[in-house]
Image (cartoon, rainbow, N blue to C red):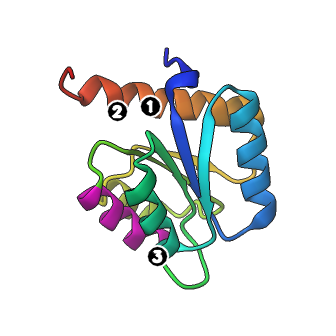
Amino acid sequence: MVSPKLASVLIIDDNVVIRYMLRHILTAGGYEVVGEAVDGEPGITLACQLQPDLICLDVLMPVSSGLDVLTEIKQKLPRTAVLIVTGNNQSETMATALRNGADGFIQKPFKSDELLLSVAQVITKMRAMLPPA
């Protein structure tokens, strides 16, 4: 399993309550939350600056679609894992996210243990795919 102390996380979600919950759960789980953004463009900018191990990304945001943001992040930061955190359970949305490079999904509302397990699985999968440094 992943050593969470070594994993940095960026949260991109327009909902302040969800960002708070994600930050609280991840920090309590030993992850380092390095930044937060309320929409896609500022999120992409932060992601490029911080180069986190993982991005927790919402799909429905006021200005940007998380699916479009996902595509851009994967083009710019292919070594960064992306966990889609969404209340949208439509199979079309999930299929599009997979095509755009999503590494995993978690449905809102979520439980702390479910989130931590999903994050660990996504980071472990991503690190296993990377060539040795």
Q: Which residues are magenta?
A: 65-76
Q: Does dot 1 land on a helix, a strand or a loop? A: helix
Residue type highlighted by circle 2: Met
> Residue drawn 62% across and 59% down?
36
Callout 2–callout 1 Cβ contact below 8 Å: yes
Q: Which residue is mark 2?
A: 126
Q: Does dot 2 land on a helix, a strand or a loop? A: helix
| Residue 126 falls within the magenta-colored stretch | no
> Dot 3: within a 10 Å radius of its alpha carbon, few (fewer than 14), some, or many (20 or more) residues?
some
> Dot 2: within a 10 Å radius of its alpha carbon, few (fewer than 14), some, or many (20 or more) residues?
some
Give me the C-alpha separation between circle 2 and circle 1: 5 Å
Labels 1 and 3: the sequence-earlier one: 3
Callout 1–callout 3 Cβ contact below 8 Å: no
> Residue drawn 24% across and 60% down?
75
Please, what is the dominant secondary structure of the magenta stretch? helix
Q: Is residue 60 left or right of residue 97?
A: right
Work out whether 94 lies above or below 72.
Answer: above
Q: Is residue 14 left or right of residue 2?
A: right
Q: Which residue is mark 3?
A: 41
Residue type highlighted by circle 1: Ile
